[in-house]
Amino acid sequence: MSGAQKFVQADLGVTDGQLEVLIGATSVYSLVGSLAAGWTCDRAGRRRAVALAAAMFLAGSAATAAANGYAALMAGQLVAGVACGFGLVVAPVYIAEIAPASSRGFLSSIPEIAGNSGILLSYIADFALADLPTTLNWRLMIGIGAVPPLFLAAAAVLAMPETPRWLVLHGRHDEARRVLARTAGDADRRLREIAASVREASKGGAGGEGVWRELLLRPTPAVRRVMLAILGLQVFQQACGVAAMVLYAPRVFSHVGITSDRAVLGATVLLGAAKTVAIVVPLFLADRLGRRPMLLASAAGMAASLLVLGLSVRAPAAAASYSWWAAATCVAAAAAFMATFSLGFGPVISMYGSEILPLRLRAQGTGIGTAINRVMSAVVGMTFISMYEAVGMAGTFYIFAAFSAAAWVFVYACLPETKGRSLEEMEALFDAGANKPSPRPTLS
């Protein structure tokens, strides 16, 4: 949608206000999907939820590409948005539950890597298809999004096993042992640990009403601290403005004097490349350095790059040489922001959130966190154009920089380190830390 929006407006007569609502509404729709995904994961299983999300992704992309008016665009984005909410919940839960502790950080980065790769491919598609007729190019840009879900649905049906924790939770111990034998080495020991965790969970009531009560109404000190960590991270992830940069980068570049459509879309491809390449770093370092150092470094880098970005868009366009310098600085700062976001606040947040929740609360808790994330994303997407018209483009990025600095303080003060710990140890970690300060970060 980032590169397609200009052509959608030209072809269907969509206004800036309608575009803001369309883009922001997609995040609202994903809020519905994220809340429904937790219930679906618990009832139907993690694997079936993945297959359902893939089917909705395919239908949403196809319907949006075929739209002949604003209402049809909204309907297609409704389906795609619900699918997005499902995917954001199901993927981290599935990986957290099936991955061994020693490589959980590595494997939990895969959804973020896949998402960033998809963003990059969409930017490349925008660039490659921009010269086609306006009535066709944006439809192809969006319609090709229906291709990857075909492969995901096939994998979910033919190759992916159900997670052992869900199988144990539903009394299917033999199937859980077979899955653990493929993924965990010492299957019998891990099965006993998981079974003990499930029994402990059942004492507190594993039903749907009991889960919501423990999460929101009467949480223990450990659960309260877990939910504070999850909700705080999800708010700050979007408050830093990443959705604005992903969705509106062409507008930002046009603001500093880049006028050619191909130059604007080429600069946007550079952002996608920086975001995707940087995501590889936490893939290899999350299990070595830990989650806290990577989040702290990411927040600091985002704040600094957003400040530079704000300064660059203040440059007047009167002098051609100064305008060229400002445009180059703007693109470089935007790329640095995308890269530093991907170092921590992109992949590590979903990794951290899915691993600290107790088994009995994991699906629903992840759904709540994702719902908050989608609300914040919708706020940013629906207000970015109005915000920069009210306070200026530079002021908007200064606000995002302030939120990034606040995110650094939050991580330092509130988040304990979790690397190398099994999922069954997390509640004890947060229970022990409820009355103690968080450990200082280790940088080496």
Image: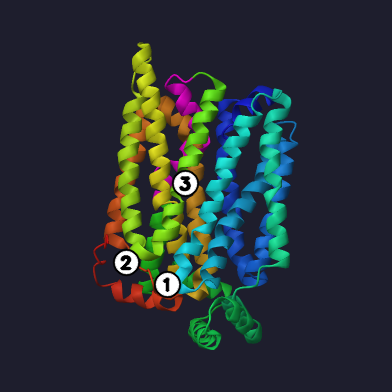
Q: From the viewer's perspective, is the residue at label 3 or at label 1 nearer? A: 3
Q: Which residue is mark 1?
A: 218
Q: Which residues are magenta?
A: 236-258
Q: Residue at left 57%, top 72%?
A: 208
Q: Which residue is mark 3?
A: 277
Q: Amino acid at mark 1?
A: Arg
Q: Position of residue 383 (x, y in %)?
A: 47, 35
Q: Is residue 111 above or below residue 205?
A: above
Q: Is residue 414 above or below residue 297?
A: below
**SS at circle 3:** helix
Q: Quadrant of the C terminus?
A: bottom left
Q: Residue at left 57%, top 67%?
A: 94
Q: Is residue 341 above or below residue 188?
A: above
Q: Earlier in the sequence, mark 3 or mark 2?
A: 3
Q: Position of residue 5 (x, y in %)?
A: 60, 30
Magenta highlight on residue 156: no
Q: Earlier in the sequence, mark 3 or mark 1?
A: 1
Query: From mark 2 to mark 1, how far is it between C-alphas?
Result: 23 Å
Q: Which residue is mark 2?
A: 416
**SS at circle 2:** loop
